Amino acid sequence: MKKGKLFYNLLLAAQGAAGIGALVFLFLHRELFFGESTETDQYAMKIEPMRPSFFIGACVVIACVTLIGILHLLRLRKNADEGDGSGARKTAPEVTAIISVIMIGANAAMSLFVIELINNPWISLLQNQYIILGCGITLAIYLMFVFLTNSVTVGMILGNILFLVWGMANCFILEFRSIPLQWVDFSSFKTAMNVAHGYVYQLSWQMVIGMCAVFSIIILYLHLGNYHMGRKLWSKIASRIIFIGITAAFYIVIFRTDFLADTGIWLRDWHPQYTYKLFGMESGFFAFAKASFPEPPADYSDDRVGEIIETSRKVNGDYEVSDAVIPDNIICVMNETFADMTIYPGLRMSSDPCEYFNSITENAQTGPLMVSVLGGFTANTEYEFLTGNSTMMQPSNVVYNSYIKSDQYSIARTLSAQGYRTIAMHPYYPNGWNREFVYPRMGFDEFISLDDFVNPQLMRGLVTDQCDYEMITDLVEHKKKGEKLFIFNVTIQNHSQYKTIGFPSTVEVFGYEGAYKGQAEQYETLISISNDALKYLIDYFSESDEKTLICFWGDHQPSVSDDYMTYLLGKDQENATFEEQQMQYQTKYLIWANYDIPEKQGEMLSSNYLGSYLLSLTGLDQPDYSQYLLKMRNVIPALNAFGYYGTDGAQHQYDTDDVAPAQQEKLDEYKCLIYNELTQEKDRDETFYALE
């Protein structure tokens, strides 16, 4: 057998095997197309009856593409036998150009459809202008690949793979944390890899269709041949120059102008998926990406900051240190995904997972805590606590990954200046959220991570709260005589996802029978276990001779499915008021001491105030910035990245007519101070943010 014939026979076998493999893959997932639907979104339910049609269509497309490929290879083999052995026929350049234009344009439209089918239950509601915008964005990205590789075939294959992976990644991330894939996630790659193995990945029928579509289009490109933009050196150089031009133009239009906003796209920061669904995933992604680079406040200047600081010092006067007890130990526990979900009117359970937490009243203060994240972005809550800075200027960003490039002022530095040994502690990988670099810049003396736990007790593969707290008590027991200790501890036990097989749930959820029921009960069981561990921690220090102050709070609520949120709220989430939406950004805090402190229950706080408020209960000194924050609570009692809790007891959304002038003035001041402290390393007034 001639080598040429053998080569084409191998290609024929590969083509046939690929087609059969794709059909087998499709049939193995047929239950997704013919089984009972679990969809609850009213618009997605309109598409669900079309699942069998999509299945049949996918089978037909794969079969046709496979047949076309086989016939094409047979023709090439015949040409090779009859001709010079090349097996190829020359195509006129103008025909090649026309085919390329048609393929790229059609492919861009197909990719937009696939990425929206996978992610957007409102796909049928997309307005024409946003369909055109999405196609334009997709086309621009495809052209970047084509001119970068100088090949239509290679560029389009890479582009198709990119859009499929992007669409599927967005869908999985949305399921895991209720927030879609965002620009900042690319700077959190290590963190994502650390936690990725803990999730259960289940394909949807939309993903299967997307995979089949991309498989088919790649086969077609391979049979069309490797269409180069040019083969000569000058044309290759020109191709790369065009790539640079397209990329630069794309960047300028998307990131340096208000083009997206001018098309009518607006951001719902506290619910990014709403923006993605309304305007398309790609348009929403880039709109949020642009917003993730905060600009200086409108009235920001060095003089303006100086005026705010001077006024603050005049208002505060000479700060008088409280005669309260100075603790020997200050222990701050930010508990992973700890929240009391009974704040929702629809939730009914067999028992109260937070029963112990809610029973603590002696020498304690408890209440609701406003936070700025949901289902993830834990680091933003700890940043707000440690620094007093809100993330209102960058709600779609993770400050730890983007901005902590130099030393920052924090509660750790405040306590270190007053003789405390400062320890950051997190029983997980040290590179998560860049903590191994951030904590030293926050002023911590030590960082205890998973690497420092010997044979730890695990639950669902994660270090338990009980084991975590035993490390805390061990640190206290073995500290030097007379040493004062500050421990900032971020737990890991309750981290999502809540699909661990064989995990015994002891809390039952009533009145809801949706697909999320098992996860909800597993989550509530974990919260119950956290309460038991908290009891251990408090019982231990109740017997301690050392004065110990404990601050405990949750970083965010868990990510839940849309239908479970409908059950919790008693209404569809899209019809919820801003105040009801803000319920998703509420956890709880507890301040407890083994000595007398003022007792208070039910007062609303927010994570940016919590650190300063905690120190106000001690006899320790505080920097002027902490005093500014405490005074600010008289005007704005609590806030997060999306709105504030007013003195009238109501929630108010930023950038609306609902914000009163006095509150807006205070918010504008606060933004100037945040921007100054976070970004102006050499021009900050150290005497304002830190103790001398």
Image: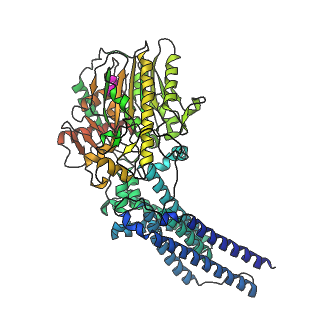
Quadrant of image for the N terminus: bottom right
Question: Magenta includes 613?
Answer: yes
Q: Report the coloring of the rendering.
A: rainbow
Question: Magenta includes 454?
Answer: no
Foreground residue among 400 and 48: 48
Which residue sits furthest right?
A: 1
Q: Quadrant of residue 666?
A: top left
Foreground residue among 251 and 188: 188
Residue 303 shows up from this direction: no
Residue visible at 51% across and 24% down? Answer: 470
Which residue sits furthest bottom?
A: 82
Tag count in the figure?
Answer: 0
- Main SS of the magenta segment? helix
Q: Note whether 249 is above or below 638 in the view shown.
A: below
- Residue extent of the magenta highlight: 611-615
Measured as percent of width and height from the top left, residue 609 is found at 32, 32
Quadrant of image for the C terminus: top left
Q: Quadrant of residue 129?
A: bottom left
Q: Quadrant of residue 389?
A: top left
Residue visible at 57% across and 30% down? Answer: 456
Measured as percent of width and height from the top left, residue 226 is found at 62, 74
Measured as percent of width and height from the top left, residue 65 is found at 58, 76
Measured as percent of width and height from the top left, residue 614 is found at 34, 25
Question: Would residue 205 be found to the left or right of residue 47 on screen?
Answer: right
Residue 76 shows up from this direction: yes
Foreground residue among 189 and 341: 341
Foreground residue among 381 and 577: 577
Q: Note whether 9 is above or below 637 in the view shown.
A: below
Question: Would residue 245 be found to the left or right of residue 347 on screen?
Answer: right
